[in-house]
Image (tube, rainbow, N blue to C red):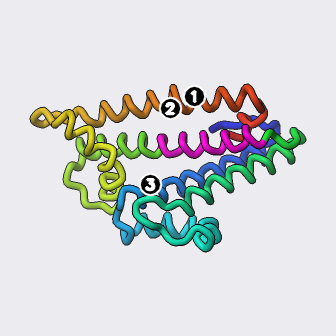
Amino acid sequence: MGSHLGNTGLDLVNTLVNIYLFLMMLRFLLQASRADYYNPLSQSVVKITQPVVRPFQSVLGPVMGRFDLATLAAGFVLKVVVMVALLQLAGVGMPRIDSLALAAFAFLASTILDIYFYALLIMIILSWVAPRASHPGALLVMQLVEPIMAPVRRVIPPLGMLDLSPIVVFIGINLIDGIVIGSLIRTVASGTPALLAVF
């Protein structure tokens, strides 16, 4: 996600926006995984992201089922607006619309994969050092990764104390990131290379 616009201020803005988008996609995934809404960390994520999500909720309505479309749409629009603004400020000009939309989609998908990657890493570490941890953060991580772990466990059940499912999920994440996201980024680069500077 690093960018080189030739301006430290623009780089900083891009980084801060990307961190905020990370929290928005975390909110989306917490809803999708039916994580505890009243967990203090869940509440913090909702409060931080609500100012941007609220206008989209008024158009798309409240969350129905697992998928919070308002948060997803808000993240997409925010990334598009910020990419356009940063490129304009950097003097690059207006990028192609199709490349812009594809870059925003690729960024959000990559962010979701990053969240799962870090959550799995934390879950593995916790399973070694604090397998019965009751901290709100630990509980939230377990709830977040369970929907992607459960289908793998049904196919590859734990072998005694050894659970191979995290390894399989890690491989899946890397394959999707390398093949799917990599392909999207290459397409963006071939259409509007300047967009990679604000990815």
For the C terminus, give its image quadrant.
top right
* Position of 138 relative to 6 (above/below): below
Q: Residues within 10 Å of mark 2 (few under 14, many from 20)?
A: some
Quadrant of residue 181 within the rendered picture: top right
Whether residues under marks 1 and 3 lie with C-beta atoms below 8 angstroms apart, the answer is: no
| Residue 46 on the magenta span | no
Alpha carbons under labels 2 and 3: distance apart: 17 Å
Quadrant of residue 11 within the rendered picture: top right
Residue type (three-letter) at the residue carrying disc 1: Gly
Q: Residue at x 34, y 48 (%)?
A: 145
Q: Residue at x 16, y 36 (%)?
A: 157
Residue type (three-letter) at the residue carrying disc 3: Leu
N-term mark: 2 or 3: 3
Whether residues under marks 2 and 3 lie with C-beta atoms below 8 angstroms apart, the answer is: no
- Of 42 and 188, nearer the camera is 188
Whether residues under marks 1 and 2 lie with C-beta atoms below 8 angstroms apart, the answer is: yes
Q: Would residue 16 appear left or right of 39 to someone viewing this image?
A: right
Q: Would residue 27 appear left or right of 98 to someone viewing this image?
A: left
Q: Residue at x 49, y 45 (%)?
A: 112
Range of magenta residues: 97-114
Q: Which mark is residue 6?
A: none
Q: Residues within 10 Å of mark 1 (few under 14, many from 20)?
A: some
Q: Residues within 10 Å of mark 3 (few under 14, many from 20)?
A: many
Q: Which mark is residue 182?
A: 1
Alpha carbons under labels 1 and 2: distance apart: 6 Å
Q: Which residue lies under the disc numbered 3? A: 29
Q: Would residue 87 appear left or right of 12 to someone viewing this image?
A: right
Counting every numbered tag in the picture gives 3
Q: Which residue lies under the disc numbered 2? A: 177
Question: Dot 3 lies on which element?
Answer: helix
